[in-house]
Amino acid sequence: MPMDNHFLSSEKLQKITGKKAEHDVVKGIQSYAEKIITDIINRSALLSRHYEKDVIDASEISVVAEKDFGCSFGLRSILQEANAPTNEHVEKIAEISRQRY
């Protein structure tokens, strides 16, 4: 996609950062942004196909963005990861480890 017509133009990047960026930096950020969006759309399409739907809706985008990229989509916010141990659990395990030695 030409840089002039990219959804993330160098002007937008300059507005966000307040600084000018080198041509290679702008190209790299644009490529990365395009890859992430393409990945989210493709994975959402696969999920939609799995659910036997004809349309990708916000729920598929939300699931992919949260699970694969750690981002929230829409009004939902990311809750603490289910697999992350609580501080109390970590302290309890540390105490058990200290008692062994």
Image (tube, grey):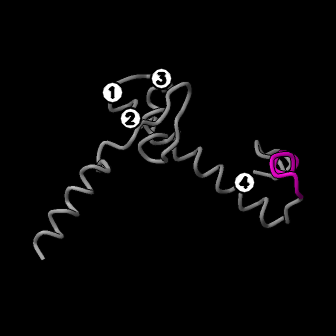
Main SS of the magenta part reads helix
Q: Which mark is residue 51?
A: 1
Point out the stretch of residues depicted in magenta. Answer: 11-19
Q: CA distance from mark 1 to mark 3?
A: 10 Å
Q: Along the horizontal axis of the image, is 37 left or right of 26? A: left
The reply to whether the C-beta atoms of the residues labelled 1 and 2 are less than 8 Å apart is yes
Amino acid on which disc 3 is placed:
Val
Dot 4 crowding, Cα within 10 Å, few <14, some 14–19, many 20+: many
- The verdict on residue 20 being magenta is no
Dot 3 crowding, Cα within 10 Å, few <14, some 14–19, many 20+: few
Amino acid on which disc 1 is placed:
Tyr
Residue at numbered disc 3: 55
Residue at numbered disc 4: 30
Which type of secondary structure does the marked residue at label 4 adopt? Answer: helix
The reply to whether the C-beta atoms of the residues labelled 2 and 4 are less than 8 Å apart is no
Q: CA distance from mark 1 to mark 4?
A: 31 Å
